[in-house]
Image (tube, rainbow, N blue to C red):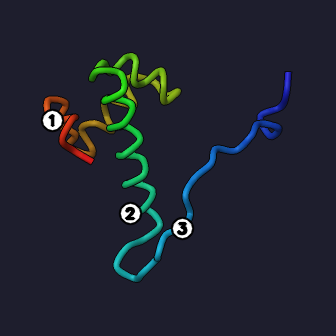
Amino acid sequence: GADEGDREKPCIDTDIEFNRQYTLYDYLAEYEKSFIIRALRDQGGIKKHAAAVLNIPESTLRLKIKQYNIDLDKLGTIH
């Protein structure tokens, strides 16, 4: 099999206007939150399936949902 280093990198949008109001970590958190919301939405709110799509443990997903205050009942309306 191929080494981890041989894997293709994911494509991300880096066309962001940085300013002093936000740090790198603020942007990373917003990206992470949006990926989680999208995965949950795509998987009908089923955490087990969303975690599998994101390739993270379900326990990590649950922590992130709590950390970002993601309301599973309002997945259709949040960004």
Dot 3: within a 10 Å radius of its alpha carbon, few (fewer than 14), some, or many (20 or more) residues? few
Q: Which mark is residue 26?
A: 2
**Picture coordinates of residue 7, whole percent (x, y):** 76, 36
Q: Against 66, is 23 above or below?
A: below
Q: Residues within 10 Å of mark 1 (few under 14, many from 20)?
A: few
SS class, disc 3: loop
Residue drawn at (83%, 31%) of the image: 3
Q: Nearer the viewer, mark 2 or mark 1?
A: 1
Residue placed under numbered mark 1 in the picture: 74
Where is residue 4 shown, x and y percent of the image?
77, 34
- Quadrant that contains the N terminus: top right
Instruction: Report, in whole angstroms, how far the alpha carbon at label 2 lies from the one at label 1.
Output: 23 Å
Splitting the image into 4 quarters, where does residue 28 fall?
bottom left
CB-based contact (under 8 Å), mark 2 and mark 1: no
Mark 3 or mark 2, earlier in chain: 3
| Label 2 environment density (alpha carbons within 10 Å; few <14, some 14–19, many ≥20) | few
Q: Is residue 18 above or below residue 69?
A: below
Left or right, 4 with reference to 20? right
Is 33 left or right of 15, judged from the image as shown? left
Which residue is identified by label 3? Answer: 15
Tell me the kind of residue under disc 3: Asp
The numbered mark, 3 or 1, whose residue comes first in the sequence reads 3
